[in-house]
Image (cartoon, helix red, strand yellow):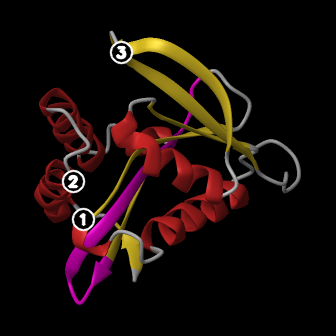
Amino acid sequence: MIRPASASDAPTLVTLSAQTGFFKPHEIDTLEAVLADYFHSTRDDYGHRCIVWADHDTIIGYLYYAPEEMTDRTWYVWWMAVATSRQGQGIGRQLLQFAEHDIHTMGGRLVVIETSDTAQYEPTRRFYLRCGYAATAHIPDFYADGDGMVIFTKRLEVVSKHR
């Protein structure tokens, strides 16, 4: 079941992210800070959203997304993770589709996701392609030497006029 995240979920989201092996320690620290801000209304005031997939009160995935400042209805997926034991079961796809629908109903027109270009992230890049995203940019050595950024985008059907 997909539901909005609550403040009591934050430690679980941090642990789940760390256990995937895809996030560096400084990224986990950043996630903790982002969630602390979010649950203290700082980020929520700006339209940020955090959703979780809970299976019998056990969180097995989440997605954090927000409108990108200084753009016309562009949204950014900041964080996404699914428990390693549940990957490949469609949970990530359903979280992403839920967020896309939510963004669409708010008049969003474009979703942006970034990820690493290293071999470890090849399954992640294939996942985004299978979900209808296009790899629209590549910045070599962005995160570190030998660790570039791949930017994925997906256009959403425009609902009507600007929010």
Q: Residue furthest bottom?
A: 56
Name above or below for residue 71 compared with residue 75. Answer: above
Q: Element under label 1?
A: helix
The residue located at (32%, 37%) in the rendering is 42
Residue 130 is inside the magenta segment: no
Out of 127 and 69, give the one closest to the viewer. Answer: 127
Mark 3 lies on residue: 146
Q: Is residue 16 visible?
A: yes
Q: Residue furthest front?
A: 119
* Circle 3 crowding by C-alpha within 10 Å: few under 14, some 14–19, many from 20: few
* Circle 1 crowding by C-alpha within 10 Å: few under 14, some 14–19, many from 20: some
Q: Amino acid at mark 3?
A: Gly
Q: Position of residue 73 (x, y in %)?
A: 71, 37
Query: Where does the magenta region start and end?
Result: 54-69
Q: Amino acid at mark 2?
A: Thr
Q: Position of residue 111 (x, y in %)?
A: 64, 43
User: Which mark is nearer the camera, 1 or 3?
Assistant: 3
Q: Element under label 2?
A: helix
Mark 2 lies on residue: 20
Counting residues from the start of the chain, the first of labels 2 and 1 encountered is 2
Q: Position of residue 83 (x, y in %)?
A: 25, 66
Residue 58 is inside the magenta segment: yes
Mark 1 lies on residue: 84
Counting residues from the start of the chain, the first of labels 3 and 2 encountered is 2
Name above or below for residue 145 compared with residue 106. Answer: above
* Circle 2 crowding by C-alpha within 10 Å: few under 14, some 14–19, many from 20: some
Out of 92 and 116, give the one closest to the viewer. Answer: 116
Q: Residue furthest right?
A: 160
Is residue 117 toward the left or the right of residue 133 in the image? left
